[in-house]
Amino acid sequence: MSTLVPLSATVRDHSPAGLWAALVREASFLARDRAALLVLGTLCLLATTSVSLGLIELARQDAAIERFRSLDAADRRAALEGVNDWGDAAYAAFHATWQSPSPLSFAALGQRDVSPYMLRVRMLALEGQIHEADTGNPELALTGRFDLAFVVAFLAPIALVLLLHDVVSHERESGRMTLLVATAGDARRLWASRFLVRIAAVTAVILLPFGCAAMAASVPPGAALLAAGAILASIAAWSLLLVPLAFRPWASTVIATAGVGLWVLLALLVPLAGRALVDASVPRVEGSDIALLQREAVNDAWDLPKSVTMERFFESHPQWARTRPIDAPFDWRWYYAFQQVGDEAAAALSQRYRASIAARDRWAGVLAWFSPSVAVQRALQHLANTDVAATLRYDARIRAYHASLRRFWYPLLFEEQLFDRGQLDRLPEFATGVD
C-alpha cells in the first residue's frame, strides 16, 4: 500500500515550511495509492450513511413526539368532556411524558434505541405503567442502530490498521529501506509525516460528514466541538497503539494480523468480558418483577378491609388521616389510596432496580479505561444525552410529574370538593425540553 518516496531536501528541512512540504508530499503519494483511497472512500461512505440515518431517526423521533403530544391533548379533552366527578376525571385523564432528543443524538442514539422515550401516565399505580411500557422491536434492540458512534468505535480502527500496518514494512520488504533512510537524513521526520497524513485522512473522512450533519441538525458549536474532540481522542488512542506495531521487524501480513488481533481484544473481547464481570458483580433487578409486585399489592387490596388499606395510606399521607371514614362499597378515595399503596409496596424493589442500573453504568465507565471503543461510545452518548444517566433522569421526571398529579387530585378527592370543571384547566403539565 505504501509508495516509494522520492528523495527530497524537504525531509532535511526542519522549518515549519519544510514540515508542511513533507506533509504535502506524503498527501500526494497517498492520493495515488488506490488501496488507501478504497479504504478511505469506504470509511467516508459508512460515516456519511451513519449520520444520514441518524438525521432521519432524529427527525422521526421529533415528529413522533409532536404527534404524540397533540393526540394526547385531544384524547384528554375528549375523555374529560363527559365526566362529572373528580374520581372519574382522574381515572380518565392520561398525560403524555416524553424525552426530547438533543440535536447531537443523530451521532449516538444510545439508550434511545432500547428504552421508551414517550410514555402516557395517569393517576393509577405508577410502577406498572413504567415497567409495562413497550420498548419497541426486540430484534432491533438486539442489533442496535448503525450510528456514527459505531463507525468511530469499531470501523475507524480497522481503517487505521489497513492504512498503517505496512508504512514501514513495505519499504523494508521492497529493499528500499536502507537507501530511503540514509538519503532522508531525518528518518523521524519522514515516518512522522507519513503516519500523520494517513491518520489525518481517516480523521477527515469522519469529521467532514459529522460536521455537515451537525450544521444540518443545528448542534450548538460547543457540543459539536466536544464531540469532535471525542472522535479525535479515539483515533489518537488507536493510532498510539498501532503505530508502534508498524515499526516491528515483522512481515506486513503479520503486523496486519497483530493489529486486527488488538482490535478484537480491545473492541470486542474486553467489553464482553467486562459485561460478564458486571453481570456477576451487580445483581440485576427485572422491571417485570416490580410490575408484578405492584400489581399483586393492588389486586390484594380488593379483598382486604378498606380500613387496612387506608391505614397504610395514611402512614405516608398523614395530612388526610382526619378525612371522612369510608363506609361505601366503593369510594374513589379508597381506590386511589390502594393504587399508591401498591406503588409503595414495590418502592424498595424499584429503588434497587434504579440503583443496579446506575451501578452497572459506573462499572461500564471503569471498563472504558481499557477499551477506546467503549470510551468513545460513552463520551458521544453523554454529549448527546442518550446515555444511561439520561434515561434515569427521564425516569425521575416521570416520577416527579406523577407526584405533581397526586398533589393536584388528592385535595379534590379527600376534601370532597364540589366538582368544578374549571379546575381541570389547572392540571399540571409535564416539563418540556431535553434532559
Image (cartoon, helix red, strand yellow):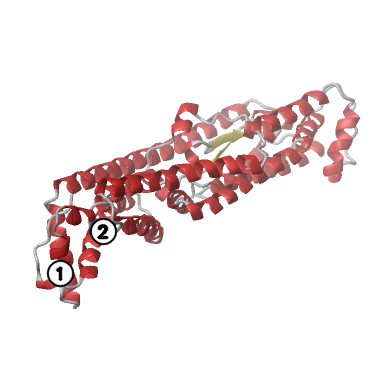
Badge 2 amino acid:
Ala
Q: Secondary structure at mark 2?
A: helix
Which residue is depicted at the point 72% across and 40% down?
406
- The disc at residue 182 is 1
Q: Residue at x 79, y 28 (%)?
A: 297
Q: Measure the C-alpha gap from mark 1 to mark 2.
A: 27 Å
- Residue 179 position, x and y percent, is 13, 65
The answer to whether residue 329 is left or right of residue 159 is right
Q: Is residue 305 left or right of residue 152?
A: right
Q: Are marks 1 and 2 in contact (CB under 8 Å)?
A: no
| Residue picked out by circle 2 | 200
Residue 253 is situated, as x and y percent measured from the top left of the image, at 26, 45
Q: Callout 1: helix, strand or loop?
A: helix
| Placement of 430 over or under 250, stated as above or below | above
Of 133 and 21, which appears nearest the observer?
21
Q: Earlier in the sequence, mark 1 or mark 2?
A: 1
Residue 398 lies, in percent from the top left, at 62, 42
The answer to whether 327 appears left or right of 363 in the picture is: right
Neighbor class of circle 2 (other Cα within 10 Å; few <14, some 14-19, many 20+) is some
Q: Is residue 124 above or below residue 250?
A: above
Residue at x 10% of width, y 73% of height: 9
Return the x and y of residue 141 as percentages of the image width and height: 48, 32
Q: Nearer the viewer, mark 1 or mark 2?
A: 1
* Residue type, mark 1 in image: Ala
User: Crowdedness of circle 1 by 10 Å Cα count: few (<14), some, many (20+)?
Assistant: few
256 or 280: which is nearer to us?
256
